[in-house]
Image (cartoon, rainbow, N blue to C red):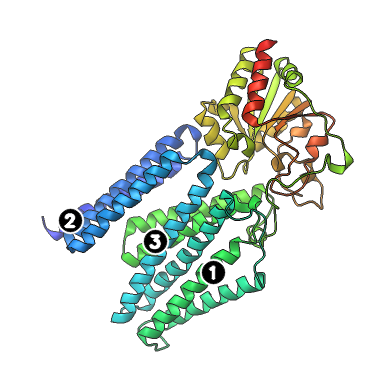
């Protein structure tokens, strides 16, 4: 087969893969089609990878190179398959952070390798140098920042903001070093306005990469655990951008398209999540929000009293209600109680109760966390209501059942002067009666007491989410 035919077929396969990415991303807009969209995108990536492998083999490759590719396939595919099958849903945000780190690191390594070769043979012209260096910088920041974010979510690093020596001045200085080095390498490209020896160029590149790696650490450490979902989304966008830069470096159109899609969608998601918390992205990056989970709370916010109830008391309210709104949170995910809440809901529906689920945009640890978790338990998609749709219904609800949700239900968000002021919340306190299942009075990531817990309409059922729901189900059955 002629070179022209091979190149044509490879480019056609890349186009098919890119189209699959776009269509798959579109299908992920709806829970009903998200699984099919994921499969379509994965299929597109498979086509793109196989086409790239064919292109490399046809162009000629050494035995060593082929062995490296095969080993990479086996290791990468094996590790990916293992994590996909073994990681719990509650640990999915950490896995996404790890994937971000791998993607950013890979893009940075491609850029570094290409720049070293280009600098040595004098082919680092301006038009390519800017993409190469940007890829190395963005990929390095994403690599180190994602590892820190994943460590915070996994509990390997404290979830509270950690101040670095020198604070924001240190982070700013690192950014200036990386930016200055980037500019120097771009203007010092072959044929540029500044003549630089190849050894100097490579040395500057490594200084830039080192500054970018440390910048990723100092940028994420001061950010509190409550903002980690937004940070992960932002780093995901950065990973896509770095991948797109790598696509320019190695002249691979499908990598450019895939990276651009990830970068654009990640950027949009970051903005939407920041809006859901009523905070700007720059304010989030400034750090300092959230003291981490598990901080002991007082017996009541603003001097109020907490009213503890039994499973039997709560069951009576639920069983004889006409409308119940379930508010799932991270506590439900940790306890793996999605099947228990579905069982309770089905039991109530059999008694004629209208049951809906209120989903806050930042409930859990990542966007769509609650949707995926509940869909896994076969909760009907129409029953999952987003915040804007469900909030007007709380006033008409007989009971709001809060399962492991904290900051996203705190009425303190409506008052100025609190860490959550202005954050859109679920209007749980407007329901006629409120039942909260929670292990303790511990605070959420915002580090403040939840005023909902001292509302006279609120009854606190202290239990693990799965245990509490099981007790409620048994009590309803006994009525």
- The image shows residue 375 at horizontal and vertical percentages of 52, 30
Is 432 on the left or on the right of 15, as rendered?
right
Residue 20 in which image quadrant: top left
Location of mark 1 (residue): 214
Disc 3 versus disc 2: nearer the observer = 3
Identify the disc placed on residue 6.
2
Looking at the image, residue 432 lies above or below residue 30 = above
**Residue found 45% across the figure and 42% down from its top:** 26
Residue 206 in which image quadrant: bottom left
Of the two numbered discs 3 and 2 on the same chain, state the one appearing first in sequence.
Answer: 2
Nearest the eye: 255 or 438: 438
Is 274 on the left or on the right of 321, as rendered?
left
Which element carries disc 3, helix, strand or loop? helix
Disc 1 versus disc 3: nearer the observer = 1
Residue 395 in which image quadrant: top right
Location of mark 3 (residue): 106
C-alpha gap between disc 1 and disc 3 = 17 Å
Q: Residue furthest top?
A: 479
**Residue found 76% across the figure and 52% down from its top:** 419
**Residue found 30% across the figure and 55% down from its top:** 72
């Amino acid at each position: 087969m002629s070179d022209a035919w091979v190149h044509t077929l490879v480019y056609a396969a890349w186009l098919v893969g890119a189209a699959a990415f776009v269509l798959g991303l579109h299908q992920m807009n709806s829970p009903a089609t998200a699984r099919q969209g994921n499969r379509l995108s994965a299929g597109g990536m498979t086509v793109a990878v196989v086409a790239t492998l064919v292109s490399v083999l046809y162009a000629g490759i050494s035995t060593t190179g082929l062995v490296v590719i095969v080993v990479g396939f086996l290791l990468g595919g094996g590790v990916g398959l293992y994590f996909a099958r073994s990681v719990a849903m509650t640990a999915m945000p950490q896995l996404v952070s790890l994937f971000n780190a791998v993607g950013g690191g890979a893009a940075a390594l491609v850029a570094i390798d290409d720049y070293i070769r280009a600098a040595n043979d004098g082919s680092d012209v301006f038009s390519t140098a800017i993409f190469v260096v940007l890829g190395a910088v963005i990929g390095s920041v994403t690599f180190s920042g994602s590892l820190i974010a994943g460590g915070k979510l996994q509990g390997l690093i404290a979830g509270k903001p950690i101040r670095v020596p020198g604070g924001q001045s240190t982070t700013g200085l690192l950014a200036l070093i990386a930016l200055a080095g980037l500019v120097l390498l771009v203007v010092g490209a072959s044929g540029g306005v500044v003549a630089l020896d190849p050894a100097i160029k490579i040395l500057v590149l490594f200084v830039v990469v080192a500054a970018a790696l440390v910048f990723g650490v100092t940028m994420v450490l001061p950010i509190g655990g409550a903002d980690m979902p937004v940070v992960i989304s932002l780093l995901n966008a950065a990973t896509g951008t770095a991948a797109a830069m790598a696509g320019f470096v190695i002249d691979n159109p499908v990598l450019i398209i895939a990276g651009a899609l990830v970068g654009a969608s990640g950027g949009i998601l970051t903005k939407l999540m920041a809006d859901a918390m009523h905070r700007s992205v720059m304010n989030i990056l400034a750090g300092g929000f959230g003291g981490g989970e598990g901080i002991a709370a007082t017996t009541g916010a603003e001097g109020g009293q907490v009213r503890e109830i039994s499973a039997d008391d709560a069951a009576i309210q639920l069983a004889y209600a006409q409308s119940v709104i379930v508010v799932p949170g991270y506590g439900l995910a940790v306890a793996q109680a999605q099947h228990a809440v579905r069982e309770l809901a089905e039991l109530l529906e059999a008694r004629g109760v209208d049951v809906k689920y209120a989903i806050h945009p930042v409930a859990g640890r990542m966007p769509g966390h609650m949707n995926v978790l509940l869909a896994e338990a076969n909760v009907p998609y129409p029953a999952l209501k987003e915040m804007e749709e469900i909030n007007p219904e709380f006033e008409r609800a007989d009971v709001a059942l809060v399962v492991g949700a904290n900051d996203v239900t705190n009425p303190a968000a409506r008052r100025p002067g609190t860490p959550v002021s202005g954050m859109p919340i679920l209007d749980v306190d407007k329901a006629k009666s409120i039942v909260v299942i929670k292990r303790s009075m511990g605070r959420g990531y915002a580090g403040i007491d939840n005023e909902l817990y001292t509302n006279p309409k609120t009854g606190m059922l202290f239990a693990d989410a799965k245990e509490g729901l099981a007790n409620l189900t048994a009590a309803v059955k006994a009525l």
